[in-house]
Image (spheres, rainbow, N blue to C red):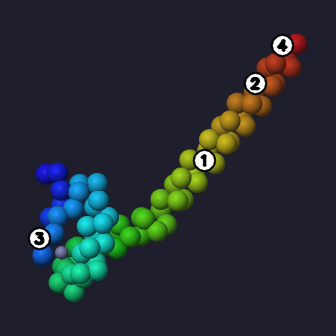
């Protein structure tokens, strides 16, 4: 399967565009959706709205902490050797 096909109107979406597909379902067919589909959409909207940026921040913060730690240890070793 290389693409999503809307089971309500037959529109197709690229494989990478699951969010676009879910968006389409939400915009055009929300009232026809089953409970599971609605839950799926809510979960994905939640991820896009809040979880993604938080995860990126966490990665950046971890990188900064690790870089700071490496710098401190490097400096300590440098001073100690001299
Ligand atoms: Zn559709």
* Contact flag, marks 1 and 2 (Cβ < 8 Å): no
Q: To which residue does mark 3 refer?
A: 10
What residue is shown at x 13% (from left), y 51% (from top)?
Answer: 1
Nearer the camera: disc 4 or disc 1? 1
Q: To which residue does mark 2 refer?
A: 74
Relative image position of residue 52 (x, y in whole percent): 47, 59
* Mark 4 → mark 2, Cα distance in angstroms: 11 Å
* Disc 2 crowd, CA 10 A, few/some/many (<14, 14-19, 20+): few
Label 4 secondary element: helix
* The quadrant where residue 78 appears: top right
Name the residue furthest bottom.
31
* Mark 4 → mark 1, Cα distance in angstroms: 31 Å
Nearer the camera: disc 1 or disc 2? 1
Label 2 secondary element: helix
* Mark 3 → mark 2, Cα distance in angstroms: 60 Å
Mark closest to the chain's N terminus, 3 or 2: 3
15 or 46: nearer the viewer: 15
* Mark 1 → mark 3, Cα distance in angstroms: 41 Å
* Mark 1 → mark 2, Cα distance in angstroms: 21 Å
Q: To which residue does mark 1 refer?
A: 60
* Mark 3 → mark 4, Cα distance in angstroms: 70 Å
* Disc 1 crowd, CA 10 A, few/some/many (<14, 14-19, 20+): few
What residue is shown at x 18% (from left), y 79% (from top)?
Answer: 34
Mark closest to the chain's N terminus, 4 or 2: 2
Relative image position of residue 3 (x, y in whole percent): 18, 56
Residue 81, numbered circle: 4
What residue is shown at x 35% (from left), y 69% (from top)?
Answer: 43
* Disc 3 crowd, CA 10 A, few/some/many (<14, 14-19, 20+): few
* Disc 4 crowd, CA 10 A, few/some/many (<14, 14-19, 20+): few
Mark closest to the chain's N terminus, 1 or 2: 1
Label 3 secondary element: loop
2 or 65: nearer the viewer: 2
């Amino acid at each position: 399967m290389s693409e999503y096909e809307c089971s309500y109107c037959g529109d197709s979406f690229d494989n990478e565009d699951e969010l676009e597909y879910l968006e389409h379902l939400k915009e055009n067919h929300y009232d026809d959706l089953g409970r599971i589909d609605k839950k799926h959409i809510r979960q994905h909207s939640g991820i896009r709205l809040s979880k993604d940026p938080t995860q990126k921040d966490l990665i950046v913060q971890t990188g900064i902490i690790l870089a700071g730690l490496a710098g401190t240890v490097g400096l300590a070793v440098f001073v100690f050797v001299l």
